[in-house]
Image (cartoon, rainbow, N blue to C red):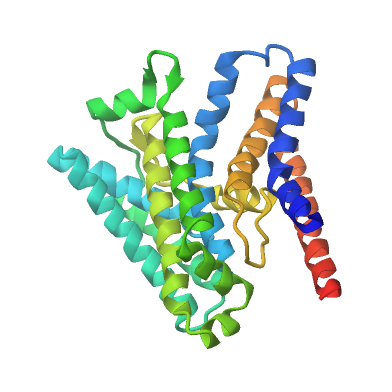
């Protein structure tokens, strides 16, 4: 019973912190208690939520990926270029997702097959893809337009709810079922907890590790396209820049152990919302934006420290 209560508390920790922070802002931040502020919170968090869910999958499997920001830029750039050339929305999506899959497979195989440290392997991919994005666009911004994309980016369901809310809900449902209610989630968790033991048990560690990076890259592609909809253009320099840090932060703050293991999908979503809520709070109170990084960094340190303490307590009990 105690273990169950502990697990439930850890699962709900990020939602509780978000709720308390939200109430605090409703009381002390001028003009915060407004429906448009709430919608903006979700819309501005959508991209980080999507890549955060992909990052949660990767971290749960014992890895990490700092190339997803560059994958966002490359895939969005390819999407915009193909859409401008062909006018086909479906074909543009398929090409962009194909690029994402290739990036994910390369990352996964280099890390799992050749035993390269995830940070080093994905750092190399980060620089390569960011350079490729700049080469493709000749260093300039690539505009694009499509009626359906404009509807998703600017219009609302029934004139009230942004499409981003629907996208977040669908993504949450998919990842919750994938990581918490399927064999795949169990296998990924096993690989993250102890890859040697997982391999000894007959699990195909290389396959499942590679799949986590593929999933992370696909979510980065979707995120890059979604983020570019807001301005109907793709900037190879700014799009996705440092987003990998926010994705890692959302995952860790959400309660997924940085060393791998049980994925907390609900926690990741609220972790991303907490980070964006802090940014909004800073802006609406006319505080220098640089303080955002200080507050976020402190939250990350606290979350990681708590994770290590919890792991140490578990080892002692064992």
Q: Is residue 233 above or below residue 256?
A: above
In the image, farthest residue toward the front: 1
Residue at the image position 40 percent from the left and 27 percent from the top? 163
Q: Which residue is more in the foreground, 263 or 141? A: 263
Q: Quadrant of residue 42?
A: top right
- In this rendering, the count of numbered labels is 0
Q: Is residue 86 above or below residue 202?
A: above
Q: Is residue 266 above or below residue 151?
A: below
Residue at the image position 63 percent from the left and 65 percent from the top? 261
Q: Position of residue 107 (x, y in %)?
A: 43, 70
Q: Which residue is more in the foreground, 313 or 318? A: 318
Q: Is residue 57 left or right of residue 193?
A: left
In the image, farthest residue toward the bottom: 200
Q: Is residue 264 left or right of residue 100?
A: right
Quadrant location of the N terminus in the rendered image? bottom right
In the image, farthest residue toward the left: 86
Q: Which residue is more in the foreground, 93 or 245? A: 93
Q: Position of residue 111 (x, y in %)?
A: 49, 76
Do we see residue 239 in this rendering? no
Q: Is residue 84 left or right of residue 286?
A: left
Quadrant location of the C terminus in the rendered image? bottom right
Do we see residue 260 in this rendering? yes
Q: Position of residue 186 (x, y in %)?
A: 53, 66
Q: Is residue 174 above or below residue 17?
A: below
Q: Quadrant of residue 283?
A: top right
Residue at the image position 30 percent from the left and 58 percent from the top? 99
Residue at the image position 46 percent from the left and 65 percent from the top? 184
Q: Position of residue 148 (x, y in %)?
A: 25, 28
Q: Which residue is more in the foreground, 182 or 307? A: 182
């Amino acid at each position: 019973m105690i273990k169950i209560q502990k697990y439930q508390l850890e699962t709900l920790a990020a939602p509780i912190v978000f709720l308390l922070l939200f109430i605090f802002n409703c009381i002390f931040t001028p003009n915060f208690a407004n429906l448009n502020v709430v919608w903006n919170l979700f819309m501005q968090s959508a991209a980080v939520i999507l890549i955060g869910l992909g990052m949660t999958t990767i971290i749960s499997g014992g890895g990490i990926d700092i190339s997803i920001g560059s994958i966002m830029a490359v895939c969005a750039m390819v999407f915009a270029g193909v859409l401008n050339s062909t006018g086909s929305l479906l074909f543009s999506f398929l090409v962009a997702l194909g690029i994402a899959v290739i990036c994910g497979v390369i990352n996964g195989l280099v890390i799992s097959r050749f035993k390269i440290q995830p940070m080093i392997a994905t750092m190399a991919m980060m620089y390569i893809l960011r350079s490729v994005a700049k080469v493709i666009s000749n260093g300039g911004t690539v505009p694009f337009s499509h009626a359906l994309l404009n509807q998703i980016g600017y219009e609302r369901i029934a004139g009230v709810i942004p499409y981003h809310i629907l996208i977040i809900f669908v993504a949450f449902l998919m990842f919750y079922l994938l990581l918490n209610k399927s064999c795949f989630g169990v296998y990924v968790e096993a690989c993250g907890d102890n890859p040697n033991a997982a391999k000894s048990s007959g699990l195909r560690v290389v396959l499942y590790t590679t799949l986590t990076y593929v999933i992370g890259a696909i979510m980065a592609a979707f995120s890059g396209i979604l983020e570019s909809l807001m301005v109907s253009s793709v900037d190879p320099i700014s799009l996705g820049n440092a987003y990998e840090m926010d994705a890692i932060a959302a995952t860790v703050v959400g309660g997924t152990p940085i060393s791998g293991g049980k994925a907390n999908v609900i926690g990741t979503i609220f972790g991303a919302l907490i980070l964006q809520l802090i940014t909004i709070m800073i802006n609406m109170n006319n505080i220098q934006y640089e303080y955002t990084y200080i507050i976020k960094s402190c939250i990350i340190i606290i979350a990681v420290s708590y994770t290590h303490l919890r792991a140490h307590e578990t080892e002692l009990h064992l």
